Image (tube, grey):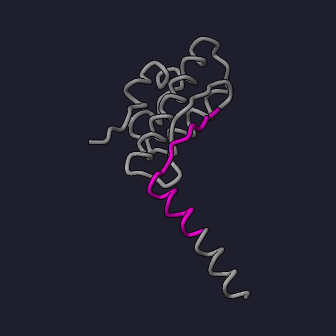
């Protein structure tokens, strides 16, 4: 009896997994850094382009942080901007530059990835 119950439960779990894998629904996630918020879509089982979406969302966050920094000149934005530069190894693009220069050139430094 226990073996039969085990196989029934295992079969149901496997069937749910299989259905989710085939459907692979999208859902929204929200990324918040300080006072910059960006919403993006992702899936339960990662698709080829999900990493591009994650990268591009962080680039949008970095651009938002730069815009806020340029308006207010508050130093709280600099460490977060530099974290994104470190995470994506954008050091050649502007790591040794001042935060003012990074934020002025934000469109060249924080560029999007594209999936073709």
> Depth check: 56 or 99 in front?
56
Residue drawn at 31 percent across, 42 percent down:
115
From the image, which quarter does the C terminus lie in? Answer: top left
Residue 80 drawn above or below residue 18: above
Tag count: 0
Q: Position of residue 34 (x, y in %)?
A: 68, 29
What span is colored magenta in the figure?
13-32
- Compared across the picture, whether 78 is left or right of 20 comes to right
Residue 72 drawn above or below residue 30: above
Q: Is residue 22 magenta?
A: yes
Q: Residue furthest left?
A: 116
Residue drawn at 53 percent across, 38 percent down:
84
Q: Quadrant of residue 31?
A: top right
Residue drawn at 47 percent across, 58 percent down:
21
> Depth check: 80 or 2 in front?
2
Residue 72 drawn above or below residue 85: above
């Amino acid at each position: 009896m226990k073996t039969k119950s085990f196989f029934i439960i295992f079969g149901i779990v496997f069937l749910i997994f299989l259905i989710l894998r085939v459907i692979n629904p999208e859902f929204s996630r929200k990324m918040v850094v300080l006072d910059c918020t960006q919403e993006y879509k992702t899936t339960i089982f990662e698709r080829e382009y999900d990493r591009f979406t994650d990268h591009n969302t962080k680039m949008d966050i970095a651009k938002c942080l730069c815009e806020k920094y340029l308006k207010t000149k508050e130093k709280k934005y600099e460490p977060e901007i530099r974290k994104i530069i470190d995470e994506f190894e954008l050091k050649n693009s502007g790591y040794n530059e001042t935060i003012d220069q990074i934020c002025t050139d934000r469109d060249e430094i924080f560029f999007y990835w594209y999936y073709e």
